[in-house]
Amino acid sequence: MSLIEFNGEQKLIQKEVKNFASTELEPITEDIEKNATFPTDIIKKLAELGFSALIIPEKYGGVEMDTTSLCITVEELSKVCASVGTILAINNCLVAYPIMKFGDEEHKKKYLDKLSLGEIGGYICEPEIDISEDEFVAEKSEKGHKITGKRNFILNGQVAKFLIMPFQTSAGKAFYFIEKDDFDSEKSNILGIRAAGITDIKFDELSLKSENCFINEEDGKSAIEDIRDYTNIAFSAVSLGLAQASLEAAIKYSKERKQFGKFISEFPMIQEMLTEMKIKIDAARFLVYDAASKFDNGKNFSEASKIARVFSGDIAVFCGLNSIQIYGGYGYMKDYPVERYFRDAKVLQLLEATPRLQKENIALELLK
């Protein structure tokens, strides 16, 4: 018996998403990545199929599928376009999940309904380094906090109708909703996942209103750990999809490219590289779906999600580099997809919570 067994519904989802990715997404992927164009039409079609609101309960207009189904969807899309897989991962994990778990009924009705109708929400990543006071200023007043300045790495920020922002105060970490009219976005020129709508934003004396706070300072620390753990699972699936795409591209090219009168797939060194990629990808897949299964079955998934995120991120980068190596000089050319797989993999490895932070948290658990 395989360690990963999808049920009938999950197999149908996998088949449907794979077909959508090959017929609808693949023809436009190169263009949207090259031009850093948010795939509005694709996201709209996915929303119509219910994939933009996968984990949202039916009472709020979602399809209420399990996390394993979310990972299947994200992995299959990411094999073709990691940007689209990332957009769905963010919309479900960093936006819908916090609202579902920590929002009150008013917040759920207001924002989950929007997401279920196909709107996109965004998330403001927390920096791991101090922000210069010249770039971002937060002033406390009797009415709360007022913020001015710039923040980087706003996930889904290009088209988001609202944002979720973790905000550090003297009393702890609170989470706020930021409405579209309260910020201006600027497109980021990033290394990879260029069509994922990652932006910078500017605030101009924005007042953080108490009614827009849905996680208070007392609960903020545990909340962000929970949100990151859940997001790790879906981001791991994006990395897994990228690794698989790199392997498939390398296999295909190795069976077409000849050197010294032989296909390079016949060379022992190439065979070893392909084998190492396959072994590592299978190991990563077990880790990703084990973390998803733990969540779906109500088990403690925190450590499993961190391990899956670190390992799958490393493997996606490893497979991207190996695929480029197998392509030789062509691997560095924009005419072939493997250089994109590598760039996307590197960005995913660092997005929202870096390997350093993940490993630090794993170590803290081990040393308790």
Image (spheres, rainbow, N blue to C red):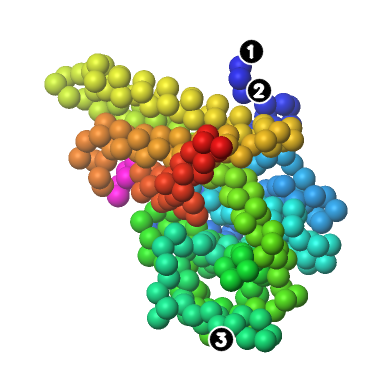
Sooner in the amino-acid sequence: mark 2 or mark 3:
2
Q: Amino acid at mark 3?
A: Glu
Q: Is residue 234 left or right of residue 273?
A: right
Give the quadrant of the C terminus. Answer: top right
Q: What residue is rendered at 67% in x and 48% in y?
A: 51
| Residue at far front of view | 368
Q: What residue is rendered at 36% in x and 20% in y?
A: 275
Identify residue for label 2: 5
Disc 3 crowd rating (10 Å Cα; few below 14, some 14-19, many 20+) is some
Q: Quadrant of residue 219?
A: bottom right
Q: Is residue 235 left or right of residue 328?
A: right
Give the quadrant of the N terminus. Answer: top right
Q: Is residue 152 left or right of residue 74?
A: left
Residue 63 within the magenta-colored segment of the rendering: no
Sooner in the amino-acid sequence: mark 3 or mark 1:
1
Inspect this view and state whether residue 263 appears.
Answer: no
From which residue to which does the magenta span run? Answer: 334-339
Q: Is residue 365 left or right of residue 310?
A: right
Determine contact: label 2, label 1, CB under 8 Å: yes
Q: What residue is rendered at 77% in x and 47% in y?
A: 63
69 versus 265 height, above or below = below
Q: Amino acid at mark 2?
A: Glu
Identify residue for label 3: 205
| Residue at far top of view | 1
Q: Position of residue 354 (x, y in %)?
A: 44, 49
Disc 1 crowd rating (10 Å Cα; few below 14, some 14-19, many 20+) is few
Q: Nearer the viewer, mark 3 or mark 1?
A: 3
Circle 1: element type: loop
Q: Position of residue 104 (x, y in %)?
A: 81, 62
What mark, if any, has residue 1 been given in the picture? 1
Q: Quadrant of residue 281?
A: top left
86 versus 296 height, above or below = below
